[in-house]
Image (cartoon, helix red, strand yellow):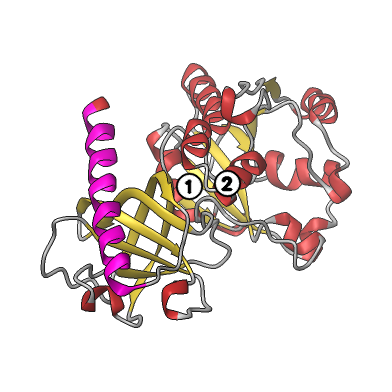
Amino acid sequence: MQRWRGLEDIPQDWGRSVVTIGSYDGVHRGHQLIIRHAVDRARELGVPAVVVTFDPHPSEVVRPGSHPPLLAPHHRRAELMAGLGVDAVLILPFTTEFSKLSPADFVVKVLVDKLHAKAVVEGPNFRFGHKAAGNVEFLSTQGKIYDFEVDVVDLFVTGEAGGGEPFSSTLTRRLVAEGDLQGAAEILGRPHRVEGVVVRGAQRGRELGFPTANVETLPHTAVPADGVYAGWLHAQGEVMPAAISVGTNPQFEGTERTVEAYAIDRVGLDLYGLHVAVDFLAFVRGQARFDTLDALLEQMAEDVKRCRELVAAAERSV
């Protein structure tokens, strides 16, 4: 899959293509529906499928300081899109100048002049251009002028976790923030993932017999609510069952929120300086302060046992 950053990266000889545009944070099941439709249309028309997305998130430019927590960094989104059959991903730097493009100018500069769109696939609520003035109806009128079709794909409606709301990144972020990782996974179609480099912390876990990877998360990461979770640690090409702690470590008067993953039943791991990923399966318990160190150790052992059971059950069900 080709990856481009900025319109100037698009090959000069790029031909017709099927295009879909959006932030696509999380590449959740609603996004997957749209992207798969774009890929199917591209195969049908014999042209490549291209996803256009933005960096930073448009809200940060339009309303500075409002950058939403991110469900997936761009490299992860690209991996997921490649798995859906996308041929190219174009990341457009979203600047103040770019935000002022009218919907008509956006169509010409991006879809017509550069990507030579043969078809554009979007969800029903797609908005684009200055002040989000463009919508799928306007896009359809432009398609008649510039010879591209517009397909509108309805999003699925979520089940119990979403209370009947359409799949959305906003809903997923809320569920993650509330610690409902199973509800988030229902929308994402996979466990929520947090990534970053392993850094040295206070090393209390090692002293207590539960050495953890202290993950310095990427900027704007959607970090789950404070608590203990079952999940997996991805490192050095391995996927390891993990007990994950999120929070400030109140037992030791901590003040900084951290994400720490203990690789269950693994000894001697040295992950310092490595980029790792943590997948969250399920909430186990909230953070708590214990009266004695022995009480804490007893609870940690129980947490690990519970996490081991939850991960094993999840792996058996696959």
146 drawn magenta: no
Q: Which residue is mark 1?
A: 77
In the rendered image, residue 107, in percent from the top left (x then y), is placed at 76, 40
Give the magenta part as a residue range: 292-316
Callout 1–callout 2 Cβ contact below 8 Å: yes
- Amino acid type, label 1: Arg
Work out which residue is located at the far top of the displayed protein and give it.
44
Q: Is residue 158 left or right of residue 189?
A: right
- Residue 85 versus residue 222: which sits nearer the camera? 222
- Amino acid type, label 2: Asp
> Crowdedness of circle 2 by 10 Å Cα count: few (<14), some, many (20+)?
many
Mark 1 lies on a secondary structure that is helix
In the rendered image, residue 268, in percent from the top left (x then y), is placed at 11, 70
Q: Earlier in the sequence, mark 1 or mark 2?
A: 2
Which quarter of the picture shows residue 234?
bottom left
The residue depicted at 74 percent of the width and 48 percent of the height is 109
The residue depicted at 56 percent of the width and 40 percent of the height is 51
Image height check: is 232 above or below 245?
A: above
Q: Does residue 232 appear in the picture of this structure? A: yes
Q: Is residue 73 left or right of residue 118?
A: left
Q: Quadrant of the N terminus?
A: top left
Q: Which residue is mark 2?
A: 25
In the rendered image, residue 162, in percent from the top left (x then y), is placed at 62, 30
- Residue 262 versus residue 273: which sits nearer the camera? 262
